[in-house]
Image (cartoon, rainbow, N blue to C red):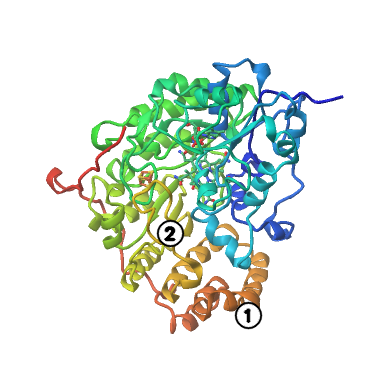
Amino acid sequence: MSNRGKKIVLAASTSESSEYLSSTWRQMLLGTLPSRYSRFPFYMIDVDWRNETLSDGQAVAVPNGLRVVESLLLEKFSPDDVVVCYPDQLDLFVGEDTRVVGVHAHNPLGITFATDVYVHFYGKKTEPINAAEFKRLITHPAIKKHKNHLKVIVGGPGSWQIEKKNLQDEWGIDCIVEGEAEDLVVDLFERALRGESLPRRIEGQSPAMEHIPTTKNRSTFGVVEITRGCGRGCQFCSIALRKGRSLPLEHILENVRVQVANGAETITITTEDLFLYEQGPKFETNVPALKKMLKSITEVPGVKNIMLTHGTISPIVRNPELLEELSPYAVGSSIHTHPASTHPDKRYASLFVGLETGSTRLFNQFMKGKAYPYKAEQWHDVVLKGMELMNRHNWFPFATFIVGLPGETEDDTKRSLDLLHALKDSKWVVIPTLFVPLEDTRMEAKESAKLAKLTELQWEFFFTCWRYNIDFYRSDPSFQRRFNLGIPIYYYMMGRRLFGKQMKYPLLRLAHFPESYLSRRLYLNLDEPSRMKVPEAVEIPQPKMRPAIPELVD
Ligand code: B12
Ligand code: SF4
């Protein structure tokens, strides 16, 4: 029997759709682990894991961006003509009648920050699982077989990576969509259905909020958006100049209900900055609105847990009462637990927080809006105070730092190390990433930082972060003993050759070598107390002294 297929087939890769062990952390690992070592038991990943499908073979959960595209198309086309699937089911849906395959790309080649770093520890020619899975999708035989009568359109936050690596033609992609797609999807797909030629690349602009549809089906990790944009102006970030805007509460709750109706028990409340939600002028946090939103989501029947995504730290310092108000929901319904939590069920709220650097000079140059209303010179105090407040309320942030910002000097790295030292006993995860110039940012023409060029101080920063994480998350002695043994073996078998001797002593800190031995060589001595103290309060500068808010694009 010949398979006629569906007119419009939407697909996302297996790894980008995965809800494996309900762990966002593990999905992030899929973006960084080399595919050829994925069976190594250390990673605790079952590579034979299969994403769940519906009885007709469609996908149960795919990244939220693709669900938005699906909803836009369903406003125009019959549900009989639109399907959403994983690569393994493409054979069921791509056939003679198919005219367009729309593919989502979150991080298709793994060349964004963090992913671009960790995979290289395994050698120069390694490909992360995400990249291997995306290739398996885009080069799928069913698409190739029917390519003469269908168009391939790729969109999503990582679609730029395909252009950057010149893979558009090799992979037979007719059109790459960058940016937000609400205002262009229907027209583009209609043109594809008519068999017209498509632009090679098209860039979407921020839509009016009313143009963002509610979703109709489940997104990976029950992602529900609450805001779009940000506006704090960090130069390395692609949404820096897009003003932060909130989705109406009823729209948010409708999406939550859809997630639950389709089997999600955990809702991931998605935003660039939680504290932007219904904010007032000049990033004034709207605590009552935030509280109402969190409360309403946790009260939707069927919602068992929530996860948070990103947030900035300065609103927490500016409004210390904020965490007290939000914690009953953010911590009380959180899916995350850790023995260090003082919550009766050991729950903690995780929040992705970009701390980025301890150098006031680099902070001032590249990201001063992040601290608003505080000044760059107050960044250390803001971070220390914010961390203390968060930890006190059982918020254990997932913090990122950028190593190798353009022009970073030894003194800049030392300032970051000083800040890291002062955060030693915090309850957190700290992820060092290397600077990557993302497309559509004001730093896109700058050079990436390279692992092979890191200085000893930068390596010290890098591995001190991981030493903290190992101590906080994998404190069982038998794991640590094996880990400590493996590190010198890695150094002599591979690390030294790939990255040079400058990584040696920093790496030995990760292996728990005594500080008395390491401090002869390294900048910090973790046995000594930090010179920095958490301030009682951080004073908000007079309006005239605050950093200028960057010019916003709507
Ligand atoms: C939720 C989320 C996650 C979740 C869930 C991811 C998932 N696979 O479902 C978790 C935490 C697991 C995650 C992980 C990672 N993420 Co993430 N994630 C997000 C977040 C916060 C929200 C995504 C979202 O739903 N946005 C709302 C939707 C509507 O936007 P959208 O996806 O961009 O979709 C729009 C357009 O892109 C377009 N579109 C999307 N798909 C398609 C398809 C077609 C055919 C078309 C035409 C258009 C189109 O239309 C949509 C409507 O406008 C974004 C930040 C953000 N606010 O977008 C980061 C973000 C996308 N993630 C990012 C990164 C870097 C990662 C990681 C690589 C992190 C890491 N370093 O380890 C991993 C990769 C994991 C993986 N296996 O893919 C970056 C991407 C940067 C880049 N691409 O270069 C972002 C932008 C965060 C940031 N500011 O840096 N992520
Ligand atoms: S605070 Fe900076 S890095 Fe974060 S989303 Fe806003 S502009 Fe981007």
Query: Which residue is the site of mark 2?
Result: 435
- Left or right: 241, with 176 as reference point: left
Looking at the image, tell me whether mark 2 or mark 1 is earlier in sequence order. 2
Residue at disc 1, secondary structure = helix
Query: Who's the residue at 65% across and 75% down the image?
Result: 485
> What residue did someone put label 1 on?
492
Q: Find residue 440 and report its horizontal and vertical position in percent.
A: 39, 46
Q: Residue at x 25, y 51 (%)?
A: 537
The quadrant of the picture occupied by the N terminus is top right
SS at badge 2: loop
Q: Amino acid at mark 2?
A: Phe
Q: Tag on residue 86?
A: none
Foreground pick, 448 / 145: 145
Whether residue 158 is visible:
yes
Query: Residue 263, percent across and down?
Result: 66, 27
Q: Is residue 267 visible?
A: no
Q: Amino acid at mark 1?
A: Tyr
Alpha-carbon distance for marks 2 and 1?
27 Å
Where residue 88 sits in the image (x, y, percent)? 75, 38
The residue carrying pointer 1 sits among few (fewer than 14), some (14 to 19) or many (20 or more) residues within 10 Å by Cα, namely few
Tag in front: 2 or 1: 2
How many marks the image carries: the answer is 2
Is residue 300 depicted above or below 344 in this figure? above
Task: Work out which quarter of the rendered image holds the C terminus and state it.
Answer: top left
Above or below 342: residue 489: below
Examine the image and state in which quarter residue 417 appears: bottom left
Q: Residue at point 37% right, 70% down?
A: 529
Mark 2 surroundings within 10 Å by alpha-carbon count, few (fewer than 14), some (14 through 19), many (20 or more): many
